[in-house]
């Protein structure tokens, strides 16, 4: 009978715990963490167990570094004292070079970034299967592990060159983190219009879900609706005036996003006069 491969996970946060639980049926899981590895092991379930970083480095066929971005260089330095055969890390903005000095010690290194939001471990268990994983590696062995892990999770991989990882990760921030900010801003304004928070979210959710569906099934030009698309300068003025004072942050966000939408409106055929009127409003000339 073939030996079950050992997967070491450094970090007991949401991503590390979720990956451990999902991969435990196929791998022996070792967990090393400065926090509370025993709690992570309990969540992951058998056959996972806690280990020191040294033991994990010695015994793992592949080590997954699932720590905050700022901690990756430190962990890589500690692992380099007893370099594992393969190390992959889950931070989307960092590449194999950020795992230095491991490559110099012969370790095959890669980025294995879940292109998914993981607010907590239990959510991660539900959301990670079937996701896309951004992959950037040095050496076929590390890339092979990335593909194997993604396959074990029912997902797919997206290859990204190391010099483009910051752009890749910025795209993820737009799609995930900034979307949360848009919901928060819209909810704030709707509450100020007289709705309760529950009412605001209940009312806004179908609108946002439909808009997102359109954005992914139509061209951006086709999907764009609203006062910017129509060139309704009077409506935009009312919005900006209503946000003066107490809603300065929301007003600034509105202006910036509206400026970004103007080229789409132009491509839809918006007349130059309407474009000029909107541009003047958004630049504060009203």
Image (cartoon, rainbow, N blue to C red):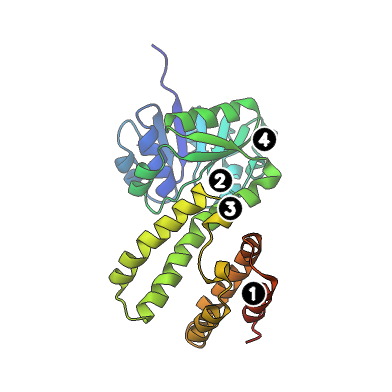
Q: Position of residue 93 (x, y in %)?
A: 60, 50
What kind of element bears circle 3? helix
Whether residue 55 is visible, yes or no, is: no
Q: Which residue: 53% across, 71% down?
A: 227
Of circles 2 and 1, the one toward us is: 1
* Mark earlier in primary sequence (3, 2): 2
* Mark earlier in primary sequence (2, 1): 2
Q: Position of residue 45 (x, y in %)?
A: 30, 36
Real-space CA distance between mark 1 and mark 3, rounded to the nearest whole angstrom = 30 Å
What kind of element bears circle 1? helix
Q: On the rendered image, what quadrant is the N terminus found in?
A: top left
Residue corresponding to mark 4: 103
* Mark earlier in primary sequence (4, 1): 4
Label of residue 75 in the image: 2
* Mark earlier in primary sequence (1, 3): 3
Of circles 1 and 3, the one toward us is: 1
Residue corresponding to mark 3: 171
Vertically, is 101 above or below 231? above
Real-space CA distance between mark 2 and mark 1, rounded to the nearest whole angstrom = 55 Å
Q: Which residue: 42% across, 77% down?
A: 189
Residue corresponding to mark 1: 274
> Is there CB contact under 8 Å for labels 3 and 2?
no
Q: Which residue: 32% across, 81% down?
A: 194
> Is there CB contact under 8 Å for labels 2 and 1?
no
* Mark earlier in primary sequence (3, 4): 4
């Amino acid at each position: 009978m073939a030996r079950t491969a050992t997967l070491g996970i450094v970090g007991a946060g949401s991503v590390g715990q979720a990956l451990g639980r999902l991969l435990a049926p196929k791998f022996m899981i070792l967990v090393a963490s400065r926090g509370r590895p025993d709690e992570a092991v309990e969540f992951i379930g058998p056959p996972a167990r806690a280990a020191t970083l040294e033991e994990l480095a010695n015994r793992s066929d592949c080590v997954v570094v699932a720590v905050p971005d700022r901690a990756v260089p430190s962990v890589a330095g500690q692992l380099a004292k007893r370099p594992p055969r393969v190390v992959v890390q889950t931070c989307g903005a960092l590449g194999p070079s950020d795992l230095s000095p491991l490559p110099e010690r012969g370790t095959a290194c890669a980025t294995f970034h879940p292109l998914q939001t993981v607010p907590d471990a239990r959510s991660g268990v539900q959301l990670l299967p079937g996701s896309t994983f951004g992959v950037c590696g040095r050496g076929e062995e590390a890339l092979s592990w990335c593909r194997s892990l993604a396959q074990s999770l029912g997902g797919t991989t997206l290859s990204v060159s190391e010099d483009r990882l910051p752009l890749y990760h910025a795209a993820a921030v737009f799609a995930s983190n900034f979307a949360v900010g848009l919901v928060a801003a819209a909810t704030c304004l709707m509450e100020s219009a007289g709705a309760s928070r529950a009412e605001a979210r209940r009312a806004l959710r179908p609108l946002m879900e439909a808009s997102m569906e359109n954005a992914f099934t139509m061209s951006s030009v086709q999907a764009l609706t609203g006062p910017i698309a129509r060139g309704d300068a009077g409506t935009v003025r009312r919005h900006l005036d209503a946000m003066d004072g107490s809603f300065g942050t929301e007003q600034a966000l509105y202006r910036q996003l509206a400026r970004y939408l103007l080229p789409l409106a132009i491509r839809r055929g918006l007349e130059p006069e309407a474009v000029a009127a909107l541009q003047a409003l958004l630049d504060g000339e009203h």
